[in-house]
Image (cartoon, helix red, strand yellow):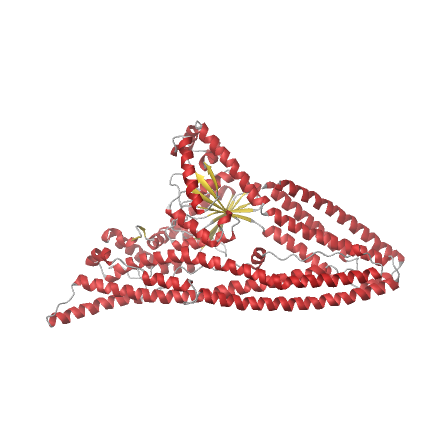
Amino acid sequence: MSACNDTKNDILAINDELSDLLSSAKATLFISDKTFRHWEKQCSEIRRQLVRERLRIAVVGPIKSGKSTFINSLLKGDYLKRGAGVVTSIITRIHPGQSLKAQLFFKSWDDINAEIRRALVLFPSTSVWKPPEEGFDIRREKDRSDLKNALAALLNSNGGTFLITNDARNENSVLLASYLDGYEKALEAISSCDDNLTLEYQDERFATHQLFVSNDALAVYLKDVQIRIDSLKRFGDIEIADCQGSDSINPSHFTFIQQYLLSANLILYVVSSRTGLRRADIDFLSVIRKMGIRKNIMFIINFDFNEHDSYNELNILVRKISAEIALIKKDASVYAISALFNLFRTQENRLSPKEQLIFSQWQHESELIAFSDKETERLETSLSQKLTSERFALLFTNIMVHQESIIKGLNRQLKINRTVLNKDALFAKALSHKIDVYQEKMEGLGRVIRRAVDGAAQKMKYDVTREVDRLFDLYSGSILRSSLDFVKNYQVEYAQYEEQLSTDSVSSVLYLVFQEFKHQLDTFLVEQIHPEIIRFLNNQEIKIIEYIESVAKPYDLMIKEIFEEFTTAAEQVELQSEHLTRSGIQFPRIDAIKADAKLSVPPIIASMHYSALVKTEAIMRVGAYWAMGLAKKIFKKPFPSEKQKKIQALENAVLRMKRDTKKSVTFNFKSYRENLKFQYMLKLIKVYSESVCNALEDSFQTYFLDTSRIDTYLTAREADKGIALAKIAETEYRAVLIMNKMDITRSRLIDNQN
């Protein structure tokens, strides 16, 4: 990877030299300003493309699978300390830097309060607290105190069942408790932040950031974490992302991982040998498959020496896990390493007494060490090949083609300039006339091209709008229909709530029902619906590229034909044809276009806004059933028991909840559909079609001359002509030096690939 970074720096240096050469030549030669602007624009784009082309590696896996230990072993230092993946959605991004630095990006108070208010929807009223109608604000001491007492009351009620969902701690109760527990320290930290709500910890204070990311009560206040580490420089310009556990209790957090995975060049999925492949792993990997990004994934089986009696026993387990992985991804790349042993080995002089004892014991496990070392070496070789040879080789080659094209274009112009300066006025006048004629033709064709590509873009906008509408249509699409079907078919096991109904209010039990229902619906949206949307968008992008390029390609041939006419005409005035050569169009990469335009797929709305009317409806139903019972008693008719009234009220409240949920889902998907169209797809079509137009126009801009300056040179004194010819010779010499450097860099690039 260091070789890749060296090549990148060499190409950047060549680009800077080329930019300087163009600036120097611009004032002397009679090359069109439009041509110079085109070349300068290309040099700027090359630099921007190289700078932004950062490799992104996502390290993903279940909680406690050893993700952070694995990353630390790559970084050869104990930099990451995690453990807050249960309730937080932060992704720690690690970049190379000159020194150690951690940046913590905090949520705003508005975002914090909005998240808390969503967690309080249908929160059961207690004898000590009712959520404030004006909206909870964690900065108000009374609100914090009341919520703390309410959570304590729920904990003591029915053995804390109100805080349990899906056989685990309710994600909202964990979130609320974490916000309360960390408030004082978070307030102090946020008060110390700059205007961007950012705190920095550098050098000897670097480790302080671990107090935030490893503590749920503080990590919940964070929006993002970025770390710069000097030891990462050996990998080049790279970003390693330590993602939260793929088995987080909050399914909406999964959307953050999904969004990052869409921009990642490589996914490293860490599996603990202690647990093997679990249900959560299979679900997560199934989502990756549905999103169409499965090809860029490698699997790490992470093991500790003390968990296995022998190498043979470990080898059997590794083969078993590998076979399970193969069922999900055929021909998967699987590596079994001991990340902790690798980390201990790099930190031998800085281990704690307990760690030193473990490390000294492990050093006797020669077979396990040999196996781990061999697998580690195999992994690092594969990583280097995957990240450099396969990805950067094509990028570097394409960029150097552009640079070479600029130099060749400049050399052609230099030869034309020399030829003109060595000819008489009659030659110059004839050449100027022919150049003007064909430049007008090219400019006219450029306008035709833009109209044609704009027309293609309009057609694609129409088609894509229709396809997006169809996707979210209740009858012709699958997104809304399957989501509403999920809500409709969701079954509540009322029998399991009978005990709570005997001691608690319907509204309190409704909270339990609601939490379970919302958890299941959010999981469905994240694991089923979002991947389907991503797959749809990938297919639409392919259609956009293919159609716009199919419209543009014939014009590339027309440009070629006009250029050949120009070449023939130029030869008639004794301008050598080798001075006039043209390469075909190179269409832009859509991923680069999206990066430049800062376009990304909007995350699906997993959190729905439920109305408090659900609870009001339940309470009214209880009153209605009580009044019905009193009337039946007066008229001596059978009437429902208190328990039956509560169950009937709960059943009706659930029906109301489902109706409200259907409205919420329909409304949210309508908003998401419009956002997807206007903030992503239509913008993508616009910027891609403009880039294709620019690429076509760029392919002939390099041949434009400033004919108005030719006469000036021809009427100049011989001494001035001599100065111009000397400048041409100097520029040619510098261009040769740049080409020599390019040849050396190209040879090194080929060697690295081999």
Quarter of the image with the C terminus is top right
246 on left or right of 549: left
Q: Position of residue 200 (x, y in %)?
A: 50, 49
Q: Residue shown at 89%/61% (left/top)?
A: 424
265 on left or right of 308: right
- Along the viewing direction, whichever of 88 and 102 lies nearer the viewer: 88
Q: Position of residue 41 (x, y in %)?
A: 67, 58
642 on left or right of 333: left
Q: Position of residue 38 (x, y in %)?
A: 70, 59
- Along the viewing direction, whichever of 712 and 98 lies nearer the viewer: 712
Q: Position of residue 61 (x, y in %)?
A: 43, 46
Q: How many marks?
A: 0
Relative height, residue 1 to residue 577 (above, below):
above
Q: Residue shown at 67%/49% (left/top)?
A: 400
Determine the residue located farthest toward the top in the rendered image. 364
Q: Is residue 445 visible?
A: yes
Relative height, residue 169 to residue 710 (above, below):
above
Q: Is residue 136 visible?
A: no
- Along the viewing direction, whichever of 423 and 581 lies nearer the viewer: 581
Quarter of the image with the N terminus is top right
Figure quadrant of residue 30: bottom right
Q: Residue shown at 64%/52% (left/top)?
A: 47
